[in-house]
Image (cartoon, helix red, strand yellow):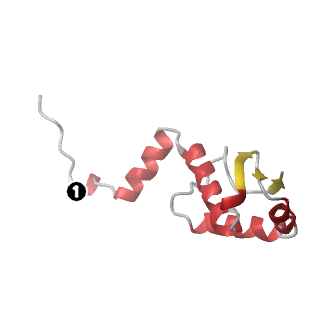
């Protein structure tokens, strides 16, 4: 049995193919969550002190090992949230229109 050939006019770019694959396999929520955690590490500078990360319903929960770090970051929550969301806007792997995992609306430090 011969495989059907695609003509050049039916070809799609690799970027479109990856986007379609992510959507079809329902990987966007997990990928977005990991990208949010990466954004936290990059923006906050607190990766060495971060013990746990959890994201649900727009709220990023962070457990830190240092009370000094937690206090310093608590003063910058609004700025951190804006910087994380800006990082996600620039991230080509972040699926912006996924209804399950979107932008960070609040940060809770523990």
Circle 1 Cα neighbour tier, 10 Å, few/some/many (<14 / 14–19 / ≥20) = few
Describe residue 39's horizontal placement relative to residue 11 as left or right.
right
Q: Is residue 98 above or below residue 9?
A: above
The image shows residue 60 at horizontal and vertical percentages of: 75, 52
The image shows residue 70 at horizontal and vertical percentages of: 83, 61
Circle 1 — which element? helix
Residue occupying image coordinates x 84% and y 68%: 72
Residue at the extreme left: 1
- Comparing 43 with 11, the one in front is 43
The image shows residue 77 at horizontal and vertical percentages of: 83, 65
- Comparing 15 with 30, the one in front is 30
Residue occupying image coordinates x 55% and y 64%: 91
Dividing the picture into quadrants, the one containing residue 36 is bottom right
Residue at the extreme top: 1
- Comparing 43 with 46, the one in front is 46
Residue occupying image coordinates x 52% and y 42%: 27
Describe residue 73's horizontal placement relative to residue 87 as left or right.
right
Describe residue 68's horizontal placement relative to residue 104 as left or right.
right
């Amino acid at each position: 049995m011969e495989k059907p050939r695609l003509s050049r006019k039916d070809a799609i770019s690799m970027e479109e193919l990856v986007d379609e694959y992510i959507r079809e396999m329902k990987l966007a929520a997990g990928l977005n969550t990991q990208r949010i955690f990466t954004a936290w590490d990059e923006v906050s500078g607190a990766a060495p002190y971060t013990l746990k990360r959890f994201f649900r319903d727009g709220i990023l929960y962070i457990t830190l090992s240092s009370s000094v770090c937690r206090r310093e970051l608590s003063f910058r929550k609004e700025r951190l949230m804006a910087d994380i969301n800006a990082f996600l806007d620039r991230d080509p792997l972040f699926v912006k229109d996924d209804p399950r995992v979107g932008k960070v609306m609040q940060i809770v430090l523990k």
